[in-house]
Amino acid sequence: LAKTTQPISMDSYEGQEVNITCSHNNIATNDYITWYQQFPSQGPRFIIQGYKTKVTNEVASLFIPADRKSSTLSLPRVSLSDTAVYYCLVGDSVTGGFKTIFGAGTRLFVKA
Amino acid sequence: GAVVSQHPSRVICKSGTSVKIECRSLDFQATTMFWYRQFPKQSLMLMATSNEGSKATYEQGVEKDKFLINHASLTLSTLTVTSAHPEDSSFYICSAPGVNEQFFGPGTRLTVL
């Protein structure tokens, strides 16, 4: 499983766009990039997943360059409730029992 | 999305006792489930893979005799912490894979006195 590297923490203010970059130099051809969000004392929650280029959903965008060695999670106009830990995971298809290895994650703190 | 539940949400027990934590996939079947442990301010650590109808596979360093896993049906996996000690106090989380993502349970806070 490819190892991921993210900033340990980030601070932002309400209404700003937040970009969290994840490095995954050893990503394999079959690997997808998935981001999860975790609030204190809760299980992680899926945010977005992509393979290449750009993916957008109702909560975030994921930018993946052509070499796929990194990815950037973009959170538009964050609010206080976006304060959480964000994990970038890289791995093979989730079907059939995809083993998920978590890195350290990025602790995002949104200030008023 | 799919829902994974855990029971209990929190448990306090005395040192030396055993504690069972249940993980259920409520609206889908899961032949595989995963168990994680998370200490305060740390990331999730994968403990083991629970396989329906066969033995669980444990990650390196995880004692299989201490953390008993039983995947009794396609919707239920249980983790039993045997002879719990204060150092086993942690947040235990299970997950089950869906088509494109892992669905995580809400977690169980275990406190061993």
Image (cartoon, coloured by chain):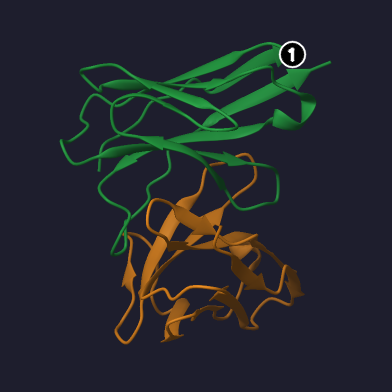
Chain colours: A green, B orange
Check disc 1 and report its element: helix, strand or loop.
loop
Q: How many marks?
A: 1
Residue B91 percent across, percent down from the top left: 63, 58
Quadrant assignment for the N terminus of chain A:
top left
Q: Residue at x 30, y 34 (%)?
A: A3
Please give left or right for residue A27 compared with residue A70 in the image. Answer: left
Q: Residues within 10 Å of mark 1 (few under 14, many from 20)?
A: some
Q: Nearer the viewer, residue B46 or A110?
A: A110
Q: Nearer the viewer, residue B54 or A63?
A: A63
Quadrant assignment for the C terminus of chain A:
top right
Quickly name the residue at label 1.
A15
Above or below — where is B47 with respect to A71?
A: below
Q: Residue at x 29, y 33 (%)?
A: A51
Q: Residue at x 32, y 54 (%)?
A: A94
Q: Label 1: chain?
A: A
Q: What residue type is disc 1 on?
A: Gly
Residue A49 percent across, percent down from the top left: 41, 37
Please give left or right for residue A80 compared with residue A103 in the image. Answer: right
Residue B105 percent across, percent down from the top left: 59, 62
The outermost residue toward the right is: A112
Residue A63 percent across, percent down from the top left: 39, 20
Please give left or right for residue A71 compared with residue B20 in the image. Answer: left
